[in-house]
Amino acid sequence: MEITFSGQIYKKEYLTIMMKYIYTRRRNLYWPVFGVFCLYMALYYKRTEGNEVLYLVLLGLGFYWVAIKHIYTYELLGNGFDTNKSSQSITQYVITEEKLYSQNQYSEGTVNWDALYFAINRPDAIILYVSNTSSFIILKRWLTPQQLQEFVAFLHTKHSIRKSGF
Amino acid sequence: MEITVNGLITEQQYISMMMRFRLLKTDSLVLLSIGAIVFAVAVFELFFGSQYTMGFLIFALYLLAYWPLRLYFFYRKSYVTSKALQGLMHYTFRDDVIATQSVNGTGDLNWDALDRVLNTRNAFFLYQNNNVFSPVMKHWFTPEQLDEFVAFVKAKEGLKAEGF
């Protein structure tokens, strides 16, 4: 098997994919829920003229979990993309039975399939995690339907990789 | 120039290095300082039997404990999930590229692709973007290699060298 394709990811696409993915993870859905709970409790303390410090603490935590956390995550991802020259350039990928080869104007490298620990199938992309901080984002539009089918079938055979959405 | 180094990082080494590095950044220091001030206020309020003590205490514990604990678990997961970090890593620094080899595979990275190189007490961090970097431990270098590497990074045009 050998699947060759190339493509470039744009900032808007990257942010959309990553933010959507972040909000489909169950634990991240607790952020706004926890935030709204904190705001509700803050309001309760205010109405009942309870402890003023506790009111301010809950208000701060509520705003953090409802708004600041999301803005921070968005900014962090955007900044990560802006400062990564390699991910902004056109990259060629070659998928073989043994490894994933990638090349662009700044770097080239091979990654053994055994090195991957997590693969996620999203509507627009397949995200291959090498560690919890480093990943390959393969946009589905870069592949032909046959290539995509072959690639997904191949990933199914890799039992050492944890999978989600396949 | 050609400098070849290789070595291992243990989980404990990695976590302690990263925790120290991250906790000494400005945002962490501000957060922990606020936590310490709030804790001091809580103790002061406790002394006077104030009704606000519990609120201050909860907030102080949140600031002082949550952030370090979160960082600890984050870096532990980073290490555990990265097979490259757990295995022997080889780096060859040349004038034009950095060649890497690990259990994950191989790679050639142009110096132009680096966002910056940070010099810390125990390691050099090669940043590929603001969030992703490769740690290269200083004890993997011989003293001569270390001098040569530092001189090279300082002289490299277009490369941001911090802490050199």
Image: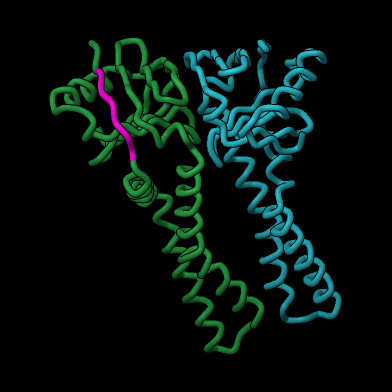
Chain colours: A green, B cyan
User: What kind of secondary structure does the magenta stretch mostly adopt?
Assistant: strand
- Residue B71 sits inside the magenta stretch: no
Residue B5, located in which quarter of the rendered image?
top right
From the viewer's perspective, tell me whether residue A41 is left or right of residue B138: left
Pick the front one: B130 or A69: B130
- Whether residue A59 is situated above or below residue A162 in the rendered picture: below
Q: How many labels sit on residues? A: 0
Q: Which residue sits furthest front? A: B157
Give x and y (percent) for residue B142: 79, 12
Q: Residue at x 63, y 76 (%)?
A: A54
Q: What residue sits 25% from the left and 18% below the top? A: A4
**Up/down of B75 relative to B99, above or below:** below
Q: Which of A133 and A34 is in front in this view?
A: A133
Residue A87 is situated, as x and y percent measured from the top left of the image, at 42, 34
Report the span colored magenta: A4-9
Q: Position of residue B82 (x, y in %)?
A: 52, 25
Quadrant (top left, top right, bottom left, bottom right) of the N terminus of chain B: top right
Q: Does the magenta stretch include residue A6?
A: yes
Q: Does residue B48 appear left or right of residue B76 in this picture? A: right
Quarter of the image holding residue A156?
A: top left
